[in-house]
Amino acid sequence: MKITKDMTIGEIIRMDMSKAEILMNFGMGCVGCPSAQGETIEEAAMVHGIDLNALLEALNK
């Protein structure tokens, strides 16, 4: 399944736990906190100053 910008962090981690490490490598150290679980990848990238396209590319490899 392709990961898209409108998917939540919680959805992605439930789909594949190994994606948490990729998120943390991009500077999202709080992937397990309750508020992050409902945040979309796009929202999280914006809040953390992360290049959304680079993040999506890494998550979809």
Image (spheres, helix red, strand yellow):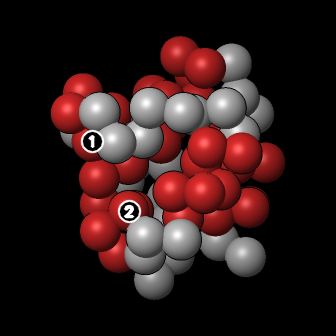
How dense is the environment of label 2, judged by Cα within 10 Å: few (below 14), some, or many (20 and up)? some
| Of the pair 22 and 57, the residue shown nearer to us | 22
Left or right: 3 as drawn, with respect to 6: right
In the picture, the quarter occupied by the C terminus is: bottom right
Distance, label 1 to label 2, CA atoms, is 9 Å
Relative vertical location of residue 38 with respect to residue 57 in this rendering, above or below: above
Mark 2: secondary structure: helix
User: Horizontal and vertical percent for residue 44?
Assistant: 49, 29
Left or right: 14 as drawn, with respect to 44: left
Furthest residue to the bottom?
1
What is the three-letter code of the residue carrying label 2? Ile
What is the three-letter code of the residue carrying label 1? Gln
The residue lying at 64 percent from left, 64 percent from top is 59
The residue lying at 65 percent from left, 71 percent from top is 60
Which disc, if any, is residue 57?
Answer: none
User: Horizontal and vertical percent for residue 38?
Assistant: 23, 38
Mark 1: secondary structure: helix
The residue lying at 45 percent from left, 83 percent from top is 1
**Comes first in the chain, label 1 or label 2:** 2
Q: Looking at the image, do the residues carrying marks 1 and 2 touch, with CB atoms under 8 Å apart?
A: yes
User: Horizontal and vertical percent for residue 41?
Assistant: 48, 42
Relative vertical location of residue 43 with respect to residue 40 in this rendering, above or below: above
Residue that label 1 marks? 37
| Of the pair 41 and 21, the residue shown nearer to us | 21
How dense is the environment of label 1, judged by Cα within 10 Å: few (below 14), some, or many (20 and up)? some
